[in-house]
């Protein structure tokens, strides 16, 4: 019997992350061509993705449960096949109701990746932090490729093929993964890394769960605040002094998030070398301090401090996922990641509400950022009471 091939696992995990984010984002470009073809308004057509986007989050819980009970690699194979068929059906849709239904199926299969894929990476890699950081890069790449490929295919062919071609590629990857599972080059049975086989005393679970839930919720809230408000903050504070155009602001924000993606990988390397708890609490404290600085900065240094804030937010995600793996009962690990994804998904509209209300009341975001900094200080104090994980096993 062949051992699980780590290189193949890395390839399919990274490809799965890329494809999941590509399929969850490419409709935002394709809808522009459907609008011209079907002569429906943009708001009518963009609302067709509402149910699909909802299922991307809600489907994470059953996907995590199935991954734990059956197979993480098997669930990723199902994701590839399901995304492929759903995307092809979207391309063949001839009415709004059919497109709504098929986009909902697409969203449901997108929900598989995070609970199954993260747990798969965590348990099949030796340098886990680095593997998580590397894998996380492909989420952002998927969003970019989805927008770029859709635009090119629509320009040279049509919007139907912008669904069908990626769908065929996903079917091909799914078939390849099934072949590798069948040939036993990739294990169908869930692999449990030895470093995650022991958990904290059962009496500590409740305290750890509460702290991690609060921390994950607040981290997601800060991420959404930064992602949504930064373009407007730069516009308000720098447009006149630096004569920034809309394009320049877009480039500045894109650069911030490209660098933060690379910092995710660096954070993974650090999480392998040092205590995950130390990396995690240091990143939370760094965000708190930087949020206070960003709140009151109106010079060109704003972009640098904003980049540092986003980088701290992004770079501690591998440490967070490692802490979840070590503090979760092994048989519920994928389910825990599913719950994390639900929380991250659900906090977005709350963040948007705070941003809108802040701008309505003050025409700025100073108090919002000060409040966000105070929130991270509270999380920092709570996170200090998390238990230190066991010593790392030499790799």
Image: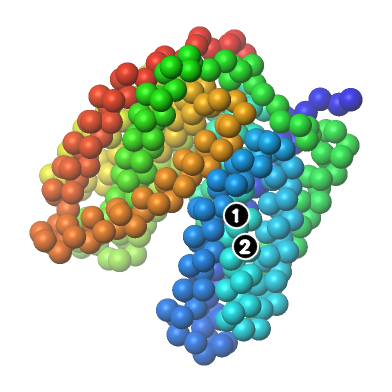
- Work out which quarter of the rendered image holds the C terminus and state it: top right
**Residue positioned 40% across, 52% down in the render:** 346
**Residue positioned 34% across, 57% down in the render:** 349
Q: Nearer the viewer, residue 120 or 173?
A: 120
At which x and y percent is residue 15? 66, 46
Is residue 280 shown above or below 53? above
Please indicate whether residue 308 sits to the left or right of residue 209 in the image: left
Q: Which mark is residue 110?
A: 1
Query: Can see residue 235?
Result: no
**Residue positioned 18% across, 36% down in the render:** 374
Q: Residue furthest front?
A: 203
Query: Can see residue 340?
Result: yes
Question: Residue 240 lies in what quarter of the image?
Answer: bottom left
**Residue positioned 26% across, 59% down in the render:** 353
Please indicate whether residue 113 sits to the left or right of residue 308 in the image: right
At which x and y percent is residue 271? 47, 23
SS at circle 1: helix
Asked if marks 1 and 2 touch (Cβ < 8 Å), the reply is yes
Is residue 298 shown above or below 169? above
Is residue 336 shown above or below 83? above
Please indicate whether residue 226 sits to the left or right of residue 317 in the image: left
How far apart marks 1 and 2 lie (CA) works out to: 6 Å
The residue identified by callout 2 is: 106
Question: Residue 10 lies in what quarter of the image?
Answer: top right
SS at circle 2: helix
């Amino acid at each position: 019997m062949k051992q699980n091939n780590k290189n193949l696992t890395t390839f399919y995990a990274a490809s799965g992350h890329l494809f999941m984010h590509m399929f969850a984002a490419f409709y935002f470009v394709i809808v522009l061509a459907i609008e011209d073809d079907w002569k429906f308004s943009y708001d009518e057509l963009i609302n067709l993705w509402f149910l699909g986007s909802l299922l991307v989050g809600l489907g994470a819980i059953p996907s995590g449960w199935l991954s734990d009970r059956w197979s993480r690699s098997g669930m990723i194979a199902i994701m590839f096949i399901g995304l492929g068929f759903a995307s092809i059906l979207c391309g063949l849709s001839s009415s709004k109701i059919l497109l709504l239904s098929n986009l909902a199926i697409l969203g449901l299969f997108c929900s598989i990746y995070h609970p199954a894929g993260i747990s798969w990476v965590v348990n099949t890699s030796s340098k886990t932090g680095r593997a998580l950081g590397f894998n996380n890069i492909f989420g952002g790449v998927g969003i970019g490729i989805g927008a770029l490929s859709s635009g090119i295919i629509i320009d040279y062919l049509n919007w139907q093929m912008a669904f069908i071609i990626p769908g065929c590629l996903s079917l091909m990857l799914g078939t390849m993964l099934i072949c590798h599972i069948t040939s036993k080059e990739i294990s169908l049975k869930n692999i449990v890394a030895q470093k995650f086989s022991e958990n904290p005393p059962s009496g500590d679970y409740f305290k750890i769960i509460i702290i991690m839930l609060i921390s994950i919720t607040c981290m997601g809230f800060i991420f959404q605040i930064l992602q949504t408000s930064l373009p407007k903050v730069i516009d308000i504070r720098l447009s006149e002094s630096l004569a920034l155009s809309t394009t320049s602001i877009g480039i500045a924000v894109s650069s911030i998030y490209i660098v933060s993606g690379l910092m995710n990988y660096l954070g993974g390397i650090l999480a392998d070398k040092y205590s995950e708890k130390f990396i995690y609490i240091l990143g939370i404290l760094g965000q708190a301090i930087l949020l206070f600085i960003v709140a009151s900065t109106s010079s060109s240094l704003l972009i640098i401090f904003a980049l540092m804030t986003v980088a701290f937010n992004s770079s501690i995600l591998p440490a967070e996922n490692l802490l979840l793996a070590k503090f979760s009962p092994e048989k519920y690990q994928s389910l825990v990641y599913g719950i994390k994804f639900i929380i991250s998904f659900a906090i977005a509209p709350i963040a948007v509400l705070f941003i809108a209300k802040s701008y309505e009341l003050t025409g700025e975001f100073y108090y919002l950022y000060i409040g966000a900094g105070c929130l991270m200080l509270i999380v920092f104090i709570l996170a200090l009471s998390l238990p230190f994980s066991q010593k790392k096993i030499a790799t």
